[in-house]
Amino acid sequence: MSTPVALGALAGFDERARALLMNTYARQPLALTSGHGVWVTDSSGRELMDLVAGIAVNVLGHAHPALQRALADQAERLVHTSNLYYTQPQLELAQRLVDSAFASRVFFCNSGAEAVEGAIKLARKWGRVHRDGAHVIVCARGAFHGRTLGALAATANARYREPFEPLPRGFVHVAYNDAGAIEAAIDDATCAVLLEPIEGESGVHPLDQGLLHDIRRICDERDVLLMLDEIQTGMGRTGRWWAHQHDGITPDVMTIAKGLGGGVPIGAIMAAPRADVFEPGDHGSTFGGGPLACAAGCAVMQTIADEGLVEHAAAMGDYLAESVSGLAPSAPIDHIRGRGLMLGVGLTIDGAPRVAAAALDAGLIVNAVGSRTLRLVPPLVITRDEIDEAVRRLGRAFATVEATA
Ligand SMILES: Cc1ncc(COP(=O)(O)O)c(C=O)c1O
């Protein structure tokens, strides 16, 4: 793949990053300096379209004025207080979240993995109080729940887990799209089932239609909690505020993060009354639910509502899927998975990283998950014209890859 763009864009970043930053990420050859909406500018001044959006985080796009204003206003007043005191932004965001979903109460933290860690503790406490010490959580293969030890124990992927074993015990993994396997895995030691409604990191794999109903029923019949990890699927991305709302069921616990702060770190656990068993001293976080992050969350939720971005995500998702499918006659596209603006483009070739690199050269940021899937999780504000332009660029990337195959 040609690299002139990448080299120009790096301008010394690569070498300095290698010297200064721990070697944890396979970064793109790109240093970003600013952005607006769906667009970002690199250090050589080149504008690119960002269909990764900070990995499904920048729901309002980059530099949205409502988020800028909320952050500036809050920073003028109060940035941090700890949870020894009340703040208005935290209560306002909790109210907005409770109004958006099934939950009656919220616990705020700072990231996705932290939300999952907290949910694991909540499930164990619930098992101790209500199910005779049951503590095992049934999880799915292909799931990704984060990099901390508990979240990693819930994550099935051996590549992430093995270097850090032994991990906490009390997790079993079953096939993702198989309610029977979940049912068979539940026994007296089980306190909860934990699932993503669409598995994101493993390549945008949705649960089959109707399966959440079956899983909800099984959890009720067997008296265990249903916990949904909506860290990637939430905040309107799939065309509903929360992906489970497509299915008309409610979980007992939900973990959220990513888009909640529009780029400002924040996560949360939401719980229905049945699962709301934490007591003082059970859990905590110095930074969790700080006024700055919560002011960001309020601005994000208000703007999503004001701009109709949930419905927009549904419509633009359909349009994006249809437009990318339109490339199929001349591109190695097998099928498109996902919902709303959370799409996986399944390829017929083992070439997703090459397509992503060619897309970068064509001025488009997309994400390869595995060798055969491109993930598209753009800002929810993306327009039809921008989708047209992004798909033109993706078409050029496919053509480059075909030409050099
Ligand atoms: C479904 C899901 N859960 C948990 C996480 C972990 O979130 P974080 O990286 O904020 O810790 C991710 C991150 O990609 C995710 O997609």
Image (spheres, rainbow, N blue to C red):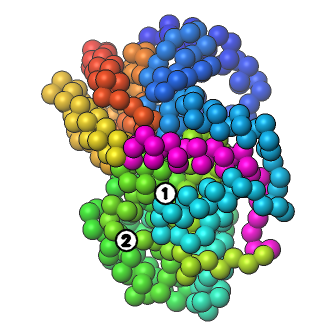
284 vs 170: above or below: above
Q: Quadrant of residue 358?
A: top left
Where in the figure is residue 62, as x and y percent of width and height? 54, 29
Provide the secondary structure element on which disc 2 rests: loop
Report if the beta carbon of the residue with label 1 is closer than 8 angstroms to ligand 1: yes
Q: What is the three-letter code of the residue carrying label 2?
A: Ile
Q: Which mark is residue 249?
A: 2
| Residue 339 located left or right of residue 335 | right
Q: Quadrant of residue 379?
A: top left
Residue placed under numbered mark 1 in the picture:
230
236 vs 242: above or below: above
108 vs 226: above or below: above
For the point 39% across and 37% down, the residue is 376
Which SS does the magenta portion mostly show? helix
For the point 56% across and 79% down, the residue is 273
Q: Quadrant of residue 344?
A: top left
Q: Which residues are magenta?
A: 281-310
Where in the figure is residue 356, as x and y percent of width and height? 41, 27
Q: Is residue 265 magenta?
A: no
Quadrant containing the C terminus is: top left
Q: What is the three-letter code of the residue carrying label 1?
A: Glu
10 Å crowding of disc 2: few (<14), some (14-19), many (20+): some
Provide the secondary structure element on which disc 1 rests: loop
For the point 80% across and 41% down, the residue is 77
